[in-house]
Image (tube, rainbow, N blue to C red):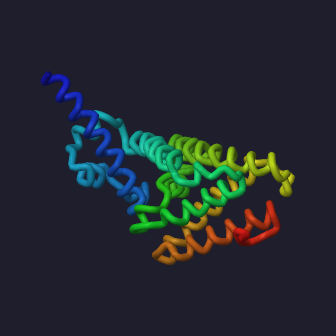
Amino acid sequence: MAEKMEDRRSRNARAKLLDAALMVIRTKGYSATTVDDLCAEAGVTKGAFFHHFRTKEDLAVAAAAHFGAMADELFSSAPFQAIVDPLERLVGYVEFRKAILQGSLPEFTCLVGTMVQEAYDSHPPIRDACNATISGHAAMVESFVAAVMAERGDPTGQGAASLALYTQAVLQGAFILAKARGGPDIAADCLDHLIRYVRLLFDGSSSREG
Protein backbone atom coordinates (compact mmCIF):
# COMPACT_ATOMS: atom_id res chain seq x y z
CA MET A 1 0.00 0.00 0.00
CA ALA A 2 2.81 2.42 0.91
CA GLU A 3 4.56 1.70 -2.38
CA LYS A 4 1.35 2.37 -4.32
CA MET A 5 0.87 5.69 -2.53
CA GLU A 6 4.47 6.65 -3.31
CA ASP A 7 3.96 5.75 -6.97
CA ARG A 8 0.82 7.89 -7.04
CA ARG A 9 2.64 10.85 -5.50
CA SER A 10 5.43 10.41 -8.03
CA ARG A 11 3.01 10.39 -10.95
CA ASN A 12 1.25 13.42 -9.51
CA ALA A 13 4.55 15.30 -9.28
CA ARG A 14 5.27 14.61 -12.94
CA ALA A 15 1.80 15.77 -13.98
CA LYS A 16 2.16 18.91 -11.86
CA LEU A 17 5.48 19.72 -13.52
CA LEU A 18 4.02 19.26 -16.99
CA ASP A 19 1.06 21.49 -16.16
CA ALA A 20 3.43 24.05 -14.65
CA ALA A 21 5.48 24.06 -17.84
CA LEU A 22 2.40 24.96 -19.88
CA MET A 23 1.84 28.13 -17.90
CA VAL A 24 5.38 29.21 -17.00
CA ILE A 25 6.92 28.73 -20.44
CA ARG A 26 4.02 30.47 -22.15
CA THR A 27 4.46 33.35 -19.70
CA LYS A 28 8.25 33.71 -19.57
CA GLY A 29 9.49 31.84 -22.63
CA TYR A 30 11.64 28.73 -22.61
CA SER A 31 15.04 30.37 -22.09
CA ALA A 32 13.93 32.56 -19.19
CA THR A 33 12.16 29.72 -17.40
CA THR A 34 14.25 28.01 -14.72
CA VAL A 35 13.90 24.69 -12.99
CA ASP A 36 13.22 26.64 -9.80
CA ASP A 37 10.36 28.46 -11.55
CA LEU A 38 8.83 25.18 -12.65
CA CYS A 39 9.16 23.59 -9.22
CA ALA A 40 7.65 26.63 -7.53
CA GLU A 41 4.66 26.68 -9.91
CA ALA A 42 4.17 22.92 -9.52
CA GLY A 43 4.68 22.93 -5.76
CA VAL A 44 7.29 20.17 -5.89
CA THR A 45 10.94 19.87 -4.90
CA LYS A 46 13.92 19.97 -7.24
CA GLY A 47 14.51 16.38 -6.22
CA ALA A 48 11.11 15.50 -7.66
CA PHE A 49 11.96 17.38 -10.84
CA PHE A 50 15.19 15.47 -11.41
CA HIS A 51 13.50 12.20 -10.53
CA HIS A 52 11.32 12.62 -13.62
CA PHE A 53 13.43 14.74 -15.97
CA ARG A 54 17.16 14.88 -16.54
CA THR A 55 17.07 18.45 -17.82
CA LYS A 56 14.77 21.36 -18.54
CA GLU A 57 14.96 20.36 -22.21
CA ASP A 58 13.62 16.90 -21.37
CA LEU A 59 10.69 18.50 -19.59
CA ALA A 60 10.03 20.79 -22.56
CA VAL A 61 9.93 17.82 -24.93
CA ALA A 62 7.48 16.02 -22.65
CA ALA A 63 5.44 19.22 -22.22
CA ALA A 64 5.02 19.52 -26.00
CA ALA A 65 3.50 16.02 -26.11
CA HIS A 66 1.38 16.79 -23.03
CA PHE A 67 0.08 19.96 -24.66
CA GLY A 68 -0.74 18.01 -27.81
CA ALA A 69 -2.63 15.36 -25.85
CA MET A 70 -4.67 18.02 -24.07
CA ALA A 71 -5.47 19.66 -27.41
CA ASP A 72 -6.52 16.32 -28.88
CA GLU A 73 -8.95 15.80 -26.01
CA LEU A 74 -10.36 19.31 -26.31
CA PHE A 75 -10.85 19.26 -30.07
CA SER A 76 -12.10 15.69 -30.32
CA SER A 77 -15.16 16.61 -28.23
CA ALA A 78 -15.67 20.14 -29.60
CA PRO A 79 -19.11 21.03 -31.03
CA PHE A 80 -17.89 21.42 -34.62
CA GLN A 81 -17.13 17.69 -34.75
CA ALA A 82 -20.87 17.01 -34.96
CA ILE A 83 -21.40 19.23 -38.02
CA VAL A 84 -22.24 17.07 -41.04
CA ASP A 85 -21.55 19.50 -43.88
CA PRO A 86 -17.78 19.38 -44.57
CA LEU A 87 -17.38 23.11 -45.27
CA GLU A 88 -19.40 24.11 -42.22
CA ARG A 89 -17.34 21.70 -40.10
CA LEU A 90 -14.10 23.31 -41.30
CA VAL A 91 -15.49 26.78 -40.63
CA GLY A 92 -16.77 25.55 -37.28
CA TYR A 93 -13.23 24.50 -36.38
CA VAL A 94 -11.93 28.02 -37.01
CA GLU A 95 -14.87 29.54 -35.14
CA PHE A 96 -14.08 27.28 -32.20
CA ARG A 97 -10.46 28.44 -32.26
CA LYS A 98 -11.76 32.00 -32.08
CA ALA A 99 -14.16 31.15 -29.24
CA ILE A 100 -11.36 29.80 -27.04
CA LEU A 101 -9.33 33.01 -27.18
CA GLN A 102 -10.18 33.45 -23.53
CA GLY A 103 -8.26 34.40 -20.41
CA SER A 104 -4.75 35.78 -20.20
CA LEU A 105 -2.21 35.52 -23.02
CA PRO A 106 -0.45 32.49 -21.50
CA GLU A 107 -3.79 30.72 -21.17
CA PHE A 108 -4.81 30.86 -24.84
CA THR A 109 -1.54 31.11 -26.77
CA CYS A 110 0.31 28.04 -27.98
CA LEU A 111 3.03 26.37 -25.91
CA VAL A 112 4.69 24.67 -28.88
CA GLY A 113 4.56 27.82 -31.00
CA THR A 114 6.17 29.74 -28.15
CA MET A 115 8.94 27.19 -27.65
CA VAL A 116 9.80 26.52 -31.28
CA GLN A 117 10.29 30.21 -32.04
CA GLU A 118 13.01 30.31 -29.39
CA ALA A 119 14.52 26.85 -29.58
CA TYR A 120 14.32 25.73 -33.22
CA ASP A 121 18.09 26.07 -33.69
CA SER A 122 19.49 25.76 -30.18
CA HIS A 123 17.44 22.75 -29.06
CA PRO A 124 16.65 20.35 -31.94
CA PRO A 125 14.77 17.87 -29.68
CA ILE A 126 12.38 20.65 -28.67
CA ARG A 127 12.00 21.73 -32.30
CA ASP A 128 11.15 18.16 -33.32
CA ALA A 129 8.69 17.71 -30.46
CA CYS A 130 6.95 20.97 -31.33
CA ASN A 131 6.81 19.99 -34.99
CA ALA A 132 5.25 16.65 -34.06
CA THR A 133 2.54 18.35 -32.02
CA ILE A 134 1.76 21.01 -34.63
CA SER A 135 1.79 18.46 -37.45
CA GLY A 136 -0.42 16.08 -35.49
CA HIS A 137 -3.02 18.80 -35.01
CA ALA A 138 -2.72 19.84 -38.65
CA ALA A 139 -3.47 16.24 -39.66
CA MET A 140 -6.87 16.54 -37.97
CA VAL A 141 -7.55 19.77 -39.87
CA GLU A 142 -6.33 18.11 -43.07
CA SER A 143 -9.09 15.52 -42.71
CA PHE A 144 -11.66 18.33 -42.57
CA VAL A 145 -10.17 20.05 -45.61
CA ALA A 146 -9.96 16.78 -47.53
CA ALA A 147 -13.67 16.20 -46.96
CA VAL A 148 -14.48 19.65 -48.32
CA MET A 149 -12.24 19.09 -51.36
CA ALA A 150 -13.82 15.70 -52.00
CA GLU A 151 -17.18 17.43 -52.27
CA ARG A 152 -16.22 20.74 -53.89
CA GLY A 153 -12.84 20.18 -55.53
CA ASP A 154 -9.48 21.75 -54.80
CA PRO A 155 -9.44 25.36 -56.00
CA THR A 156 -5.91 25.82 -54.66
CA GLY A 157 -4.31 22.99 -56.61
CA GLN A 158 -2.06 22.43 -53.60
CA GLY A 159 -3.92 19.75 -51.69
CA ALA A 160 -5.54 19.39 -48.29
CA ALA A 161 -2.30 19.13 -46.30
CA SER A 162 -1.05 22.47 -47.60
CA LEU A 163 -4.27 24.31 -46.71
CA ALA A 164 -4.39 22.65 -43.28
CA LEU A 165 -0.87 23.89 -42.52
CA TYR A 166 -1.87 27.35 -43.73
CA THR A 167 -4.60 27.43 -41.07
CA GLN A 168 -1.95 26.70 -38.47
CA ALA A 169 0.31 29.42 -39.85
CA VAL A 170 -2.55 31.91 -39.47
CA LEU A 171 -3.16 30.75 -35.90
CA GLN A 172 0.48 30.98 -34.86
CA GLY A 173 0.79 34.41 -36.46
CA ALA A 174 -2.37 35.49 -34.69
CA PHE A 175 -0.88 34.45 -31.36
CA ILE A 176 2.25 36.49 -32.07
CA LEU A 177 0.16 39.56 -32.86
CA ALA A 178 -1.89 39.00 -29.70
CA LYS A 179 1.32 39.03 -27.67
CA ALA A 180 2.52 42.17 -29.45
CA ARG A 181 -0.80 43.94 -28.87
CA GLY A 182 -1.36 42.58 -25.38
CA GLY A 183 -4.74 40.98 -26.00
CA PRO A 184 -6.85 38.63 -28.13
CA ASP A 185 -8.73 41.11 -30.33
CA ILE A 186 -6.22 41.12 -33.18
CA ALA A 187 -6.09 37.31 -33.10
CA ALA A 188 -9.88 37.17 -33.39
CA ASP A 189 -9.69 39.52 -36.38
CA CYS A 190 -7.16 37.23 -38.07
CA LEU A 191 -9.45 34.24 -37.61
CA ASP A 192 -12.37 36.19 -39.06
CA HIS A 193 -10.23 36.77 -42.16
CA LEU A 194 -9.40 33.06 -42.27
CA ILE A 195 -13.10 32.17 -42.16
CA ARG A 196 -13.82 34.59 -44.99
CA TYR A 197 -10.95 33.16 -47.02
CA VAL A 198 -12.18 29.59 -46.59
CA ARG A 199 -15.72 30.51 -47.60
CA LEU A 200 -14.59 32.52 -50.61
CA LEU A 201 -12.27 29.70 -51.62
CA PHE A 202 -14.89 26.97 -51.60
CA ASP A 203 -18.24 28.61 -52.25
CA GLY A 204 -17.53 32.17 -53.36
CA SER A 205 -19.26 33.72 -50.35
CA SER A 206 -17.87 35.48 -47.30
CA SER A 207 -20.68 34.60 -44.89
CA ARG A 208 -23.09 31.82 -44.16
CA GLU A 209 -26.13 31.94 -46.45
CA GLY A 210 -29.62 32.16 -44.97
Q: Is residue 14 left or right of residue 141?
A: left
Instruction: Give the farthest residue toward the left.
Output: 2
x then y, percent, for residue 146: 75, 46
Q: In this view, does 143 lie to the left or right of 150?
A: left
Instruction: Give the farthest residue toward the front.
Output: 210
Q: Residue at x 42, y 45 (%)?
A: 63
Is residue 168 visible in the rendered image? The answer is yes
Q: Nearer the viewer, residue 145 or 23?
A: 145
Count of numbered badges drawn on the protein: 0
Q: Which residue is drawn at 32% across and 41% down?
A: 15
41 vs 191: above or below: above
Q: Quadrant where the N terminus lies? A: top left
x then y, percent, for residue 158: 82, 51
x then y, percent, for residue 96: 55, 60
x then y, percent, for residue 119: 52, 52
Is residue 64 visible in the rendered image? The answer is no
Q: Residue at x 68, y 44 (%)?
A: 143
69 vs 34: above or below: above
- Which corner quadrant of the image does residue 13 belong to? top left
Q: Quadrant where the C terminus lies? A: bottom right
Q: Which residue is drawn at 55% across and 67% down?
A: 176
- Which corner quadrant of the image does residue 166 belong to? bottom right
Q: Which of 54 and 19 is in front in this view?
A: 19
